[in-house]
Each structure stands twice: as structure tokens, then as C-alpha cells.
Image: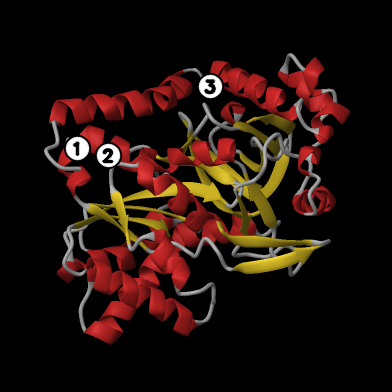
Amino acid sequence: MENIDPQAAIQLIKHQLQPWFDAIENPPKAQEEVLQNLVRIYSKTTYGKEHGANNINTVEDYRQAFPVTNYEEFRPMINKVMEGEIDLLLNEAPIGWAITRGTTKGESKFIPMTPTDLELRISAGRAMLNYMLESQHIELFSGVNLNLNFPSVVGTIKVGENEVEYGYSSGIYTKHVSKFTPIKSVPFQEDIDALGGGKTLKDWHKRFELAYEECKNRNVVLVGGVCPTAIEFGRYLRKQHKTYPKHLWNVKIMTLGSTPGINTNYQPILSAFYGPVIIREIYGATEGMFGQQKDEKRGWVPNYDIFFFEVETRSGIKMLHEMRPGEIGSLVVSTPVLPRYKIGDLILAFGNHYFRCIGRDYWWTPLNYLRKELVSFNLGRL
């Protein structure tokens, strides 16, 4: 953005963040409004009609009507959507199919992304915008975001008679949304996609070299995306160009996700590569952007105004905002695509709407998290 009016920029940022701030102040009200919006979407689908979406007025109605469902239970319906039965699960045609980087029973998960769903993912920028609001660093709008995202197109898969194009959610998001955001992402997602969807080290080195060539003479102020990829890019620059990101750019902030404990486990190596940057953690997945770090406290704050959050705890199912400090639960999220979806992540509550994802939903995850906290001398501190 050229010729930035600081006051106008601040007002724009406040306007974009206000729904999030309001929701944090009153999560029950925000979640009630989100639920009503979601059931209106579900009522237009076959799955929603079968579960009486039109008759839902309360949270209890919703819980009684819709079961908690994991990906393996959704998979047959998703396959039928890929074959062309869009109305089965969606109220609008998908604009992309996202695959997970991880696997479920050895297979990647395929998640449809709809226009409504994609519009909600703009919330990924809230961590950066809130930092700008608090720090008054409006000049960040004049810089660029170092785009290290995954390809939006990896390949095609034949489902029935259809050839379905698929890619990674971060790339799909960047391709469709970056044109509407104030900070330009470089390289352009189309240029990343043109290198192909390969996943080998050689493929990633091609993408890293593209990012280096496109950005080496630009004002890179932001690095957003996948934390391990940002680290690998730093290693690539050191090996191939005998330099570090901190010697090329004055990066102000990194908004990173995809792995737990970024601020505790990965902060030292990120600072070594990128300098004394502000790190803001994003909690998101292929299924959506669910929360982001709000301030210096090393936990993320949910997007209560966008998604509907429940957790399965030892004491039963409850709302995310009802969790007690120190309580752990398995996240159940409702999105415009997936009602009451058990995502498979364990969430730890800290109070005052600060949370951490501590890992996948396995019995040993809390023990592994505790070990890392002790080793890092963090000891559960925000």
C-alpha cells in the first residue's frame, strides 16, 4: 500500500478486529449467533435436513440432532461430494479441495473448501493486524509477506467419472484471498504452483530458490505459514547462499502454525534465523483457522465469532469457553462444511480464553507435553 494514512489504517484494523474482540468479551452470545448461522447453512444440505437442522434453536437441540463425527465417518459422504453429489454435505459448490499434510490411517484427508468457508479463513490475518494495532507499526502495510506456502494444486484424483484437482489449504487460501489483503504475498501463489506439486526435497529447494530470487531485494516484513517450512527455508539459505533471513530482511513479525509449541519449542531457532522477530502462533488446520495469538501471552485465542467450538472432556461434552484452567479436552469444531467435527487435537485451557493445542488426541500426548514443558523450563507459563 502506497501513501498510507496512519489514522485511516488504524480505523480499518479496528473495524476488522472488532468482531473478534466482541466475541472474546461475550463467548456465549457469539457462539449462539455462530450456531444459528451454521444451522441455516446445514439446513440446505441433505445431511443437515436428515438431522433436522431447521428445528434447531439451542445448543442442546444441536447436540441431540447432530452426532460428534470424525473424518472416517465423514469420508463416505465426502467421496460422494467429490463424485458430484454436492448437496449431500455442502450448500454451495467447492472452489477447491484441500489435502492434509498428515495422514489418517495412512491416507490424506480431502476437505472441500467453499466460498463461504474461504471467506472465514481471512481471520488468519488477525494476529498480524492486532500486533499492528498494539505496536502502531502501520508501515508494515508497505512491505511484503514472504510466501512459503504449499502449492494450491498438487495433482488430480479420479473419483467416479470425475478428475478432481486438489492441493494444500494454505496455498488455496493464499491464491484466492491474497488479492484482497493489504500486504502482498511474494512469490505469487500462481508462480509457486507452476513449479509443480512435488513433495521431495528437490521440489522444496525449487520453491525456496524462487522465494529467495523474488524477495531478496524486497522489503520483507512478515513471514506467515507453516513453522517447519520457515525453519527449513532458513537452513536452505544458510547452505545454498551462505546467509540468513535476518541478513537479508528486517522481518518484524512471523505468524506461524501447523505444529504445537511454536513459541516455546521453536522460538530459539526462529530467532537465530530471522532475528529478534515477534512470533504470533496460529492455530489452524486444513479444516479452518480456529484461533490465533492475541498478545505476548503464548497461547491462542479462539475465533468465537466464526466457528462453533465444543470439547470432549473427562466430565463430558462442553463448550470450549466453559473449560477450566488446566483442563484438557478433545476439540469438536463446527464449520460451514463439517458439523460437529472431531478434529483429533487435544486442547489445554489456561483461563481468560487462552488455549494451547498440545498435540493429537492420544493418551500419551499430555505426558509428552509435560516433558517438553519441563525441558524448556516453561512449566506451563503463558
Q: Amino acid at mark 1?
A: Ser
Q: Is residue 245 left or right of residue 181?
A: left
Where is residue 224? Give x, y as percent. 36, 55
**Local SS, label 1:** helix
CA–CA distance in space, label 3 to label 2: 22 Å
CA–CA distance in space, label 1 to label 3: 26 Å
Q: Which residue does the numbered mark 3 point to in the structure image? A: 27
**Local SS, label 2:** helix
Task: Judge the density around disc 2: few (<14), some (14-19), many (≥20) Cα neighbours within 10 Å.
Answer: many
CA–CA distance in space, label 1 to label 2: 6 Å
Q: Residue, x 20% and y 70% (percent of image)?
A: 216
Quarter holding the N terminus is top left
Q: Nearer the viewer, residue 367 or 179?
A: 179
Q: Amino acid at mark 2?
A: Tyr
Discs 1, 2 touching: Cβ within 8 Å? yes
Q: Residue, x 47% and y 22% (percent of image)?
A: 23
Task: Judge the density around disc 3: few (<14), some (14-19), many (≥20) Cα neighbours within 10 Å.
Answer: many
The dot on residue 135 is: 1
Quadrant of residue 266 within the rendered picture: bottom left
Say if residue 380 shows up in the picture. no
Residue extending farthest right: 50
Quick check: 256 above or below 126? below
Discs 3, 2 touching: Cβ within 8 Å? no
Q: Is residue 159 left or right of residue 208?
A: right
Q: Is residue 278 left or right of residue 22?
A: left
Quick check: 78 above or below 18? below
Where is residue 176? Give x, y as percent. 46, 48
**Local SS, label 3:** helix
